[in-house]
Amino acid sequence: MELASRLDKIPPYLFFEISRKIQEKRKQGVDVISFGIGDPDIPTPRHIIDELTRTAQDPPNHRYPESDGLPETRKAIADWYKRRFQVELDPNKEVVPLIGAKEGIGHVALCLIDPGDVAIVPDPGYPVYSVGTWFAGGECHFVALEQSRGFLPDLAGIPESIAKRAKVLWINYPNNPTGGLATEAFFKDVVAFAKKHDLAVCHDAPYSEVTFDGYRAPSFLQTPGAIDVGIEFHSVSKTYNMTGWRFGMAVGNAKLIEALTRVKSNLDSGIPQAIQYMAIEALSKTSDEWVAANNEIYRKRRDRVVSVLRDMGLTVNSPKAGLYVWAKCPEGWTSAALAAELLDKHGVVVTPGRGYGAHGEGYVRLSLTTPDARVEEGLKRLQGWRIPAAPPAR
Ligand SMILES: Cc1ncc(COP(=O)(O)O)c(C=O)c1O
């Protein structure tokens, strides 16, 4: 049996590999503390679970759902965008629910990319932007997210020959993994760039509600002209601790939403309806106070993690949004060497930045989705440990 050659390009999914390593260590009896994947440890709020329990009893919800979601689901998404961002969306043309943002991010490449076409992809970045492009037969032009530029891509530095061939520009703010934030001026530049080069913009914004220190993240769709060129991906995963239920959404340009719905309706069978009712409940009934209190848990962890990492001699920005601390490795250390040393010496898992692209090298990422007691145990192990001047030979 021969597998399709497109698989040769696709590395094993980053966190699949990390989970395997953790399991190996645990088998050896190591008490591993993971700051790896960004998967909220705090439960989904009770009122949302109650809605699942209630709607799961109703036989119509046991049948195939429609790929474009229930009308009331699309309306709840549009209402949330209006309330949160003052963005008006037509629920029947400019909204499609997803089986998590990841599903739509992967599938949208099939709407935009023909074999040989180019996608402009941030580096470091969430791996699905590039993997989706490759599955569609396209090529990625990676643009560096440099700390010196606030982790915003240099659009003016993209060669004309690439911009001409590009079909899509991927952006993601608040950014995973760097914690970078978009400015209004940046979003305006993105719209101008997309119009000049006649390309689509896909903005991935699942962390817009996980913010600290009074910061409020904008939607790309608030930018004049954005809906002419792009769509935004969002999700209930991070805001409401709902990663396991699988619910996200794409909103914006009607032509792109129609294309994505067409791809989805041919490949998947929608989101189980009881889960759609959970998402409606989450988006329409969760108070702003609950979201703020949830974020406060992450804010406290962020402060503890940043302070211990700085004591260890690492250079770290304190992020104003997202679930991650992006720490610069000391001179002489690769991200893999530092991650291996932390795992072997302290049983602490961090994600090597190289896993997010070549420009992620030199950084490690720590997720803040570990329970408080485990964060404290992990930090206790690291407290007072000074990183040696050079990594040991392995
Ligand atoms: C940048 C980014 N986009 C999308 C996703 C996927 O979110 P969802 O759970 O909605 O599929 C993640 C999850 O970690 C992410 O970090």
Image (cartoon, rainbow, N blue to C red):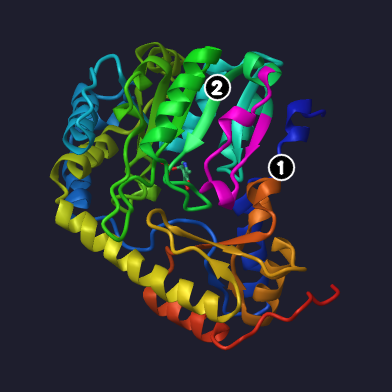
> Residue, x 52% and y 25% (percent of image)?
107
Q: Nearer the viewer, residue 163 or 370?
A: 163
Tag nearer the camera, 2 or 1: 2
Residue 233, image x, y percentages: 40, 32
Indicate the secondary structure of the residue bearing disc 2.
Answer: strand
Residue marked by disc 2:
168
Residue 307, image x, y percentages: 46, 77
Q: Amino acid at mark 2?
A: Val
Horizontal arrangement in the rendering, residue 338 relative to residue 32 (left or right): right
Residue 300, image x, y percentages: 34, 71
Indicate the secondary structure of the residue bearing disc 1.
Answer: loop
Classed neighbour count for the residue bearing mark 2: other residues with Cα under 10 Å, few (<14), some (14–19), many (≥20): many
> Residue, x 30% and y 53% (percent of image)?
215
Residue marked by disc 1:
11
The Cα–Cα distance between marks 2 and 1, rounded to whole angstroms, is: 22 Å
Any atom of ligand 1 within 8 Å of the CB at mark 1?
no
Q: Is residue 158 magenta?
A: yes
> Residue, x 40% and y 24% (percent of image)?
231
Q: Quadrant of residue 5?
A: top right
Give the magenta part as a residue range: 141-160
**Do the numbered discs 2 and 1 sit on residues whose CB atoms are within 8 Å?**
no
Q: Is residue 56 visible?
A: no
Q: Nearer the viewer, residue 106 or 203?
A: 203
Which quadrant is the N terminus positioned in? top right
Which quadrant is the C terminus positioned in? bottom right
Q: Is residue 224 magenta?
A: no
Q: Quadrant of residue 110?
A: top right
Check residue 394 in the rendering and tell me which mark sits there, or answer none.
none
